Amino acid sequence: MPERTLPPANGITTTTNATNATNIKPSPAAPTADGNSIQQPPLHQVCSSLNTRISTFLASPPPTDRLRNVQEQTRISLGVLQEALSQYGPSELSISYNGGKDCLVLLVLFLAALDRWSQSQPQSQYPPPPKAQQQQSQQPSLSKSLQSVYIIPPHPFAEVDSFVDYSVHAYALDLARYAMPMKLAFETYLHERPRVKAILVGTRRTDPHGGALSFFDKTDHGWPVFMRVHPVIDWHYAEIWAGYTSLGGTTDTHPNPALLETPVVRLSGKEGLHFRPAYELVEDEEERLGRDRATSMGIQTPRGS
């Protein structure tokens, strides 16, 4: 499937190609380019649309080994999400969302899984709708929006926050935001949403502290008690930023040194440092070299845009 370009985040075009589930145009009900908001689409409509697109992707013969692997990871992630929905149901599940590449893949998969879960529920649990509304009431088991939480980093990119705002409308999110340390943020969120028992997290195996995680892990001692669900834990680096990777904050994120062009390769004639697009990055371990902590490991991280 061809790559698509999502709306810019951090002034940098975000290209996606990992389920290619994120190869999906946000709903036309999202805010317009000039910032004017329009009506948020119903959650069941968003879920149904994404499920249809993902089902089509999974049914298509993969033209490459990479897409075959993407299809397999998509099926695994959907299975984990179905298990989470079976154990907790939508009312006890939330998703941690910050507009990043990994949680965007997770969000799209979760919305598709919600549609599948809703279709599997016995319709007798719900009062039958009036005949005139029967065609419009295809997803009676879903609420109007998806409960979610955004822990705002200390130095957020304004453009990333704008993309989060865009996502709220495009994907029908009920997003609670907290500009505080992560532990306190989750404590506050669970106090305000006491029904939430599990939170979906977009952590991957190569992320810090991700190596030993499984699909379902309870929080560590001393943290607020909830089940962490990691449906995309075994996905490899695929969602990419053009020139930047794994965005942190405005004070600790720089162009990834692994993408720095050598003078032999750089033929543009322009002065200054130049970086190849992030989709050329292959090794998972190099994803976070654009962070300040890379410098503390002895890696010379160039600054500048």
Image (tube, rainbow, N blue to C red):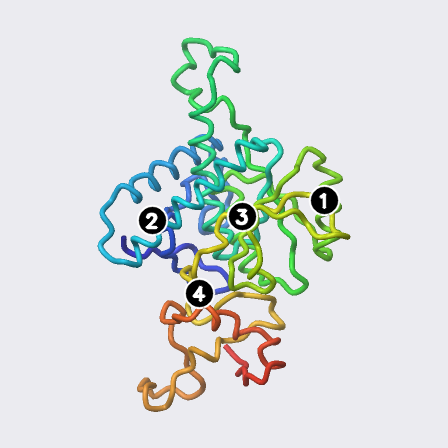
Q: Amino acid at mark 4?
A: Trp
Q: Amino acid at mark 3?
A: Phe
Upstream in sequence: badge 3 or badge 4: 3
Name the residue beneath numbered marker 2.
71
What secondary structure is found at the residue carrying circle 4? Answer: strand
The residue shown at (48%, 11%) is 128
Q: Residue at x 51, y 52 (%)?
A: 103
Q: Secondary structure at mark 1?
A: loop
The structure residue drawn at horizontal position 43% and vertical position 72%, both measured from the top left corner, is: 243
Q: Which residue is mark 4?
A: 241
Residue named by callout 3: 215
Q: Find numbered disc 3 in the image and state the secondary structure of the residue it sits on.
A: loop
Mark 1 or mark 4, whichever is nearer to me: 1
Q: Would you identify the image quadrant in which residue 251 lies?
A: bottom right
Disc 1 or 4, which lies upstream in sequence? Answer: 1
**Does the residue at mark 2 contact the one at mark 3 (Cβ under 8 Å)?**
no
Determine the CA span between mark 1 and mark 4.
34 Å
Is 83 above or below relative to 162? Answer: above
Q: Secondary structure at mark 2?
A: helix
**Of pointers 4 and 2, the one earlier in the residue sequence:** 2
- The residue nearer to you, when weighing 190 against 39, is 190
Instruction: Tell me the CA gap for discs 4 and 2.
Output: 22 Å
What distance separates the C-alpha of mark 1 from that of mark 2?
Answer: 33 Å
Calculate the distance from the C-alpha at mark 2 to the C-alpha at mark 3: 18 Å
Cβ–Cβ under 8 Å for marks 1 and 3: no
Q: Which comes sooner in the sequence, label 2 or label 3?
A: 2
Determine which quarter of the picture holds residue 249.
bottom right
Mark 4 or 2: the one toward you: 2
Image coordinates for residue 233, horizontal then vertical, percent? 50, 54
What residue does disc 1 label? 225
